[in-house]
Image: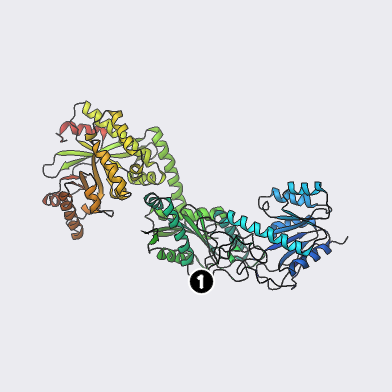
Amino acid sequence: MPMQAITDARHRGATSRPAAPAQGNETRGAAARGSPPGGWPEGMREPVVLMVDDEPITVDVLQTFLEEAGYRNVIGTSDPAKALGLIRTERPDVVLLDLKMPQVSGFDILSRMRDDPALTRVPVVVLTSSTDAATKLRALELGATDFLAKPVDPSELALRLRNTLAAKAYQDRLENFDLLTGLPNRRLFLDRLEWALQHARRFGSTGAVLHVGLDRFTQVNEAFGPGIADELLKAFADRLAARVRATDAVSTGPGVGPHAALPPGGAPPGLGRPGAGGVGPHARHEAGLLPPGGAAPALGRPGGGGVGTHPSVARIGGDEFTVLLTEVSQAEDAGRVAARILEHMVEPFRVAGHEVFVTLSIGIAVFPVDGMEVDAILKHAGVAMRHAKHHGGSACRHYSQDLDARSLARLSMEGALRRALERDELLLHFQPKVDVKSGRLTGAEALVRWASPERGLVPPGEFIPLAEETGLILPIGEYVLQQACRHIQAWAAAGLKVPRISVNVASQQFRDRQFAARVRAALDAAGLEPRRLCLELTESALLDHAEENVRSLRELKEAGLKLSIDDFGTGYSSLSYLRRFPLEELKIDRSFIADLGADQDHSAIVVAIIAMAHSLGLKVVAEGVETRGQLAFLRNHRCDQCQGFLFSKPLPAEAFAQLLSRVKGEE
């Protein structure tokens, strides 16, 4: 029987994939036999149907049926030996497969498709003239989706294809799109990125990935709860998609992905949201974002028109999003898009009656410069984003090899810090606090240090931010609390007159519902009276969930602990809450002390803070005092206590004990 290797018939004007050049005995052509019916969804990529039958006449007949029904992307092969390769190359939305064929049977093809992760979910409608139950049962066991009896009835063929494709479209939306925001998810983004890289390899084009992370989103989640946090993510996703200017045309995907399309006539009732072009609860078709009658260019296929210039936005997990830019002329173009995104996020979001401000960190990786593999590009964009976040956020950074080295260094330090907890490499130093008028010792602040065998004495500025980011601040904070209590009790037992010792409490620690219980446990384990310990909390820790914190602070106060607000002036202080917090002490942040006398604004702020604190019955401690001029200014304006290198640097526990033996402290 003569073998026609491949017949590729397409309606003229189909734009989603132009005909590829013929190779060997393969032939491809385009035929105009019918037009899409009026119910075809505008902007939806038309489905690709691939037929495998060893009888060329059957391929021709089915092709004619399909084109008359409005299917314009139809591929047929009568060479079953080449079917799998063709399926992998063309990635059809549905396969019509004959079972009884020489050399390679339909069962063989079906079995190999289900063993291939890339093809396992492609629907297969089996064509067979066999009526015995065993044949159908075997095909079902191998993963057949539906059956059509030969000779094929045109109406039945159209109906079964419509139902199969609609079901696939719905399933693909669940698998490929984020249910919360309606944006493509990580799986679909990686697929689109792979196609973009293939396009770049083929045509020598340049593209970029923007990795977008929300700064301090965890605080929003903890302050307002997961419901409002989810609403914020949805509002952010909408703005991210809508605010990229029209010429960038962000694709939020009215379709269901690069491998799925709806049949002629659209989705069955109930699958699409009214007014939307898609098939999911959050699908949407925004004007001008998709070219009429074709795929979003970012959904391009091999042999087609490429991936175009339209970016694709995706939510890849949690509070992280990506923007895929293709056909950028230079790396600076990606930077301009990132800057535009930052600019449009300045305005606050209104969510459930709350006004929420959001800042972003954006990392940029450009291909081919920063890599040509999916994992490399996504990793490099993520490294750049985290670098922007570590330096305060609200910024964008381009990837460089230097950032890679820094990222590896941070990972190495994180591992070493985890081991430091296990190996007891952390220790406490104590910085004295003195009375401004008399110069006598009034207390001390316990400060954690890391004595690493490999790195030496690691400054807290290097490992504390990392500990806060990774959650290690919780065990570190508990260690500091326990060790401080033990030192105080040991010194008292040795007959030393020990002043009140302050311990810093991280925001994550204070938000822990078991924090008060952990403090009591540390005191009980050391046999220490609560009045000997002072807890220092930052403004941000106190003002998050302020009402709840008032109750927590009162519980600690009633237990006999002293409470202090640390780094005052750096946050957004609320005087109404400051009055209600049961505090005894206020510490002025060192940034205001450094410029005393030289900066009139800072000097005025310090004077105002001292006056306000005294009016509320609080003692005032100035941090970072290093000069006699600063001390004189503070003494003149009735500051109570000072702490800084002018008096003493932080001392190891043994050295501080020696200091206690020489001076008379005050409780």
Residue 329 left/right relative to 561? right
> What amino acid is found at the position of numbered circle 1 in the picture?
Thr
**Figure quadrant of the C terminus:** top left
Residue 499, given in percent of the width and then of the height, sits at 19, 35
Residue 231 left/right relative to 611? right
**Residue sitting farthest toward the front:** 269
Q: Is residue 92 visible?
A: no
- The residue wearing badge 1 is 247
- Image height check: is 524 above or below 475? above
Q: Residue at x 16, y 35 (%)?
A: 665
Q: Label 1: few (<14), some or many (≥20) within 10 Å? A: few
Residue 380, given in percent of the width and then of the height, sits at 50, 54
Q: Nearer the viewer, residue 107 or 412?
A: 107
Q: Nearer the viewer, residue 198 or 351?
A: 351
Q: On the image, which quarter does residue 554 sit in?
A: top left
- Image height check: is 14 above or below 532? below
Q: How many numbered markers are drawn?
A: 1
Q: On the image, which quarter does residue 307 sit in?
A: bottom right
Q: Is residue 648 visible?
A: yes
Mark 1 element type: loop
Q: Nearer the viewer, residue 98 or 526?
A: 98
